[in-house]
Image (cartoon, grey):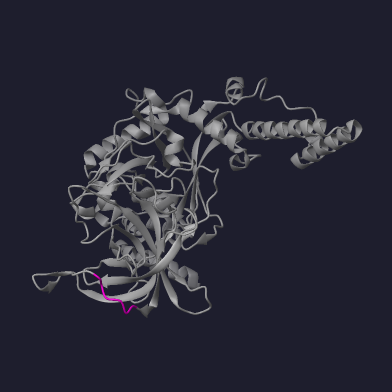
Amino acid sequence: MKIGDLLSELLLSLPEDVFALISRFLSPTDVCNLSLCCKTLCDLVDSEKIWLVQCEVVKVLPLSEIVQWRTGISSYKSLCRFLVDVMKPLVGVWVHQNPELGNVVYVMSGFLSVIGCRIIPQEVGSLGIQEGRLMWSPVFEIVSGFDGSARFFLHGIDRESSFLYPGFVTSIDKFCNVLLLEVEPKRREIERTEKLRYPFCKLPFCDRRKLLYLVTGHVGVPVSELSLKDDKAMSLERRTMLLKRHKFGGNWSHMNLEDELCYDPIQVEINDELWTHLGYGGDFRHVDDEIQVQGTQRKSLSKYFRSGIKSILRRSSSSGSSSSSSKQQASCSSEIRRFNLQTFLSSGDFVGLSVKASKIKLTSYRGWPSMHETHFALYKLPIKQPVENNQEYAGLWGGTFGWPPGKCTEEKPGKALFLLMLTYEESQDGSSERLLVGTKILEGTHYVMHPNGSAMFVVKIGSPSSEIFPFDDTTNGEEEYGFECSYSGEGIAKGYGFRYPGYKPGSLFVTSKGLLMFVWKETKTVLTLQRLNLEELLKKGVCVSPLPPCLNFTYLTKSHTNVFASGQRTS
C-alpha cells in the first residue's frame, strides 16, 4: 500500500472529535485543500464540528458569538467564509487626513456583519473616558448573506433623515490597507460580465464625484437609527430587513428573500439620461469612427492618444497661433476625458456603488500614511499587539490634557479627547536606539491645535529621564499613581506655522495603574493617556447623525473645525 493511501485511511479512521482537535493546527485554506484529495475526505472535512473549530481558529470572534451567529447563516463553513474574507481583513482603525481634527473610523463586529463607526471629535466630561458615553456615527456596514456572501451598505443623511445606500463588495484583499468607495458597471447577465476596460480610479476627480453623487441619489432607502446594543433578536430582524432592502430596494416590506425581481433597484441604468446628468450631450454609446473597435481593425487607446496629439501638432504648425493651439489642446483633453468615461460605462448595462479593499504600497512618516487627496478612501493603521519588554506600549491610547486627570470645573465642564496611536521606530540619527512615537489621530478641541497625523511626542525608550514629576500625586500620604519609570523625549510645540510644528523637551512617566503621562518640561503641561477598548466604548456610546453619503465615507475638504457634529457635547 502506498504511503499516501495509508495516511488517508488513517485520517478516515479517526473519530470526528479527534479530527476536529487536529484541525486546530490547520488553517481554513488547509482544510479546503484537504477536501480536494478525495470524496471521502471531502465529506469528513465538511462537517459542522470541523468548521466550528475553523471559525475559532480565525480568532476574530469569541466562541459564544460564533454560536449565536450560526443561527442566521446556513453553516459554520459559510460563517467561516465571511470571517476570513470580510471580517478579519477589515476590523481595525481606519483614518483620513481631513478634517484636521481627525477622521477615525473603527470597524468592528455587528451581528453577522461588520460596522464602520466614526469617532466624533468631542470633549470628555466628569465621568471620564471609560464611564462616559462616546459619540459616534455610522459610516458603512457589510452584512453576511445566508451563504456567507457580503452585502455593502453606505450610511448617510438626506433631508435630515438617515438613509442606507446599498452596493457591492468588489474585492477584499486579506492584507488590505486602503478602502475605496467606487462606482462599478454591471452587466444584465452574469456570463457576459467582462473586465473593466478603464478603471474607475483613473477617471478625473470631477467624473468620479459626479458618478458617486448620481448613484447615491438614486439608490438610497430610509432607515431607522443603528444600535450597537447586544439584542440578538432585534439584530437578526434588522439583518433580514437589510438583506431585503439590498435585493428589493424600497419595496422590501412585503417581499420574501426567495422572491425574484425583473430589475435591480440598487443599480442605475446606463442610458442617455445618465449621460446627460454627467454633463454630456448626445448618445453616450456613440464612439467616433477613429476609435471604434471592429474585429481585426481594433485600435488601442494609446494609438488614439498618439493620433490625437499628432493631429494637434499638425494643426498647430499650420496655423502658427498659440491661442488656437491651446484651444485645440483643451479640446483634445476634453475628448480624451469623454472617451475614457464612455469606455468605463460601456463595460456595463448598469452602475452601482461598490467598496474595494486593496493592498497598495504606502509611504508613511512616524506611523502616519501618505494619502491621496482626491480619492474617496480610508487608510488602515496597523495596530501591533503589545509584547512584554518589547513593544509593551504599542497600540491605541486615549486621554486628555490637565492635572489631575479627568478633573473638570464649572467654567470648563469638559476636556478635549485625544486619540493617539503609539508605535515603535528606529532612530534616524544612525544609532540603534528605539523611539516610542505617539501619533495624534483625533483631537476633540473646537478648533484644531496640531495637524492630523502629527507626533504629539517622541520618546527615547533607552534613555531614562532624570526629571521628577512636577505635581503632588499623593492622597492621604499615599501615592495615587505610583510611577514605575520615566523616559526622556520631546513633545509637540509651536513651530513654523500650523503645518510644521516644533518640539520641546519633556518626559514620559509610566504608572503602576497602566497610565502614561507625558509632561512638557518648560510649561509643566500634562497629557494623561490610557488604553482604550473602542468596541466596548462604542457599544455604550451615543449614535449621532452621519453626513451626506459620499462626504460621510471620506471628507475631502480641508477643514480645521468639527464637521461631524453640529455642536460639542460632553460625555
From this viewpoint, is residue 293 visible?
no
Query: Camera-side residue: 141 or 427?
Result: 427
Q: Residue furthest left?
A: 476
Query: Camera-side residue: 143 or 259?
Result: 143
Prevalent SS, magenta region: loop
Instruction: Give the extent of the magenta segment.
Output: 465-470
Establish if 28 lies above or below 547. Answer: below
* 65 inside magenta stretch: no
Image side of residue 105 versus residue 127, left or right: right
Query: Camera-side residue: 235 or 146?
Result: 235
From this viewpoint, is residue 546 visible?
yes
Q: Quadrant of residue 292?
A: top right
Q: Give coordinates of residue 4: x percent, y percent.
A: 49, 70
Q: Give coordinates of residue 13: x percent, y percent.
A: 35, 66
Q: Give coordinates of residue 485: x percent, y percent.
A: 28, 77
Query: Camera-side residue: 346 or 494?
Result: 494
Q: Residue furthest front?
A: 522
